[in-house]
Image: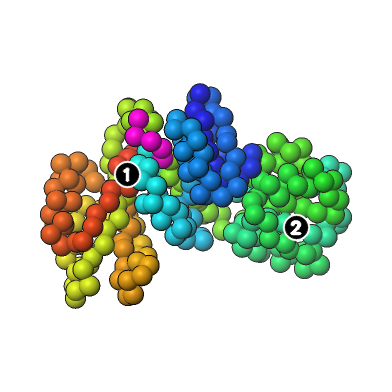
């Protein structure tokens, strides 16, 4: 059995991604309140696997999660790209005309703004989690309230679904990273073809320092899929760079890392793993 720690309650998109990533295996979901709590769950039980959203095609990157990965030094085992589709869930027997308030995570509310605009008299309230918003409605018998959540959450908490696919942009995907202790990662990756990596590096505060590093990656045929800068706390106007890239030749990838070392101050490899497939709509 795979024990996977997620941020959110049962029925959260993190849990759906975990079950899909480990399809065909028995999965026990360990709900956590915050992303940092995922790492605490792994500290408590070193065999626990973590899964954490890292970017969304609409909302962008979750910058604090990059920092958590760097801080805790747990290698990435893989990634999963999930199509995010929201529904409006209510207590059984409620209709759209009964709803006076809708609650959900602020990102989900943002992603459903066109649908919410069709309900101008309904109050919109932010909640810490999509699935927990649905759970609260059921546990507290909150008539007149609706939750924007996954259909999985609605099923788990016994809610009626009034509308499906209410997200504004149907090309709404979230990329999740799966991580854990080294022996856990090795077990997950034993049959995987490694063709992607995530690293973080810092640069000297010199003119052209970033372009020189990028030129090295280009020379070694490394395909950068993402580059994200974050300020270095306590060192004004200096930045660290989080980079994702794909490669066809693992040896040339390793050579590229050796080649950039004279150009950078620090290099940390967050993980080497197999690229996730973007699902069809």
Q: Residue at x 30, y 42 (%)?
A: 272
For residue 242, say whether it is visible.
Answer: yes
Q: Position of residue 26 (x, y in %)?
A: 53, 24
The residue lying at 19 percent from left, 47 percent from top is 253
At horizontal 45% and vertical 30% (from top left) the residue drawn is 47
Relative to 26, 231 lies left or right: left
Distance from Cα at disc 2 to Cα at disc 1 = 39 Å
On the picture, is 75 further left or further right than 60? left
The secondary element bearing badge 1 is classed as strand
Location of mark 1 (residue): 271
Is residue 161 something that shows in the picture? no
Q: Relative to the observer, which residue lies in front, 43 or 191?
A: 43
Which badge, 2 or 1, comes first in the chain's sequence?
2
- Within 10 Å of disc 1 (Cα), the crowding (few <14, some 14-19, many 20+) is many
Please indicate whether residue 125 sits to the left or right of residue 232 in the image. Answer: right
Does dot 2 land on a helix, a strand or a loop?
strand
The magenta span reads 179-183
**Residue 156 in picture, x, y percent from top left:** 70, 36
Label 2, on which residue? Answer: 102
Residue 261: x %, y % from top left: 16, 56
- Please check the rendered image and state whether residue 78 is part of the magenta-colored stretch, yes or no: no
Nearest the viewer among 118 and 66 is 66
Which of the labelled discs sits on residue 207, or is there none?
A: none
Q: Residue at x 53, y 54 (%)?
A: 172
* Residue 132, image x, y percentages: 68, 47
Relative to residue 267, is residue 157 drawn left or right?
right
């Amino acid at each position: 059995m795979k024990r996977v720690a997620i941020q959110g309650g049962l029925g959260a998109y993190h849990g759906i991604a975990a079950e899909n990533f480990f399809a065909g295996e028995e999965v026990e979901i360990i709900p956590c309140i915050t992303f940092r709590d995922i790492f605490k769950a792994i500290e408590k039980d070193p065999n626990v696997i973590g899964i954490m959203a890292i970017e969304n095609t609409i909302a962008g990157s979750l910058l604090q999660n990059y920092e958590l990965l760097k801080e805790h030094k747990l290698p990435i085992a893989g990634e999963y790209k999930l199509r995010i589709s929201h529904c409006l869930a209510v207590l059984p027997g409620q209709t759209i005309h009964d709803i006076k308030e809708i609650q959900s995570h602020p990102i989900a509310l943002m992603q459903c703004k066109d649908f919410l605009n069709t309900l101008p008299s309904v109050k919109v309230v932010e909640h810490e989690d999509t699935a927990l918003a649905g759970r609260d409605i059921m546990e507290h018998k909150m008539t007149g309230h609706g939750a924007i959540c996954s259909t999985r959450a609605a099923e788990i908490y016994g809610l009626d679904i009034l509308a499906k696919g209410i997200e504004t942009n149907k090309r709404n995907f979230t990329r999740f990273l799966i991580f854990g202790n080294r022996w856990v990662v090795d077990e997950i990756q034993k049959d995987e073809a490694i063709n992607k990596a995530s690293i973080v590096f810092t640069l000297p505060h010199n003119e052209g320092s970033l372009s020189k590093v990028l030129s090295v990656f280009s020379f070694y045929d490394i395909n950068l899929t993402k580059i994200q800068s974050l300020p270095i706390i306590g060192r004004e106007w200096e930045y660290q760079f989080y980079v994702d890239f794909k490669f066809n030749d693992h040896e040339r990838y390793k050579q590229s890392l050796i080649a950039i070392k004279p150009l950078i101050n620090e290099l940390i490899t967050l993980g080497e793993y197999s690229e996730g497939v973007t699902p069809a709509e």
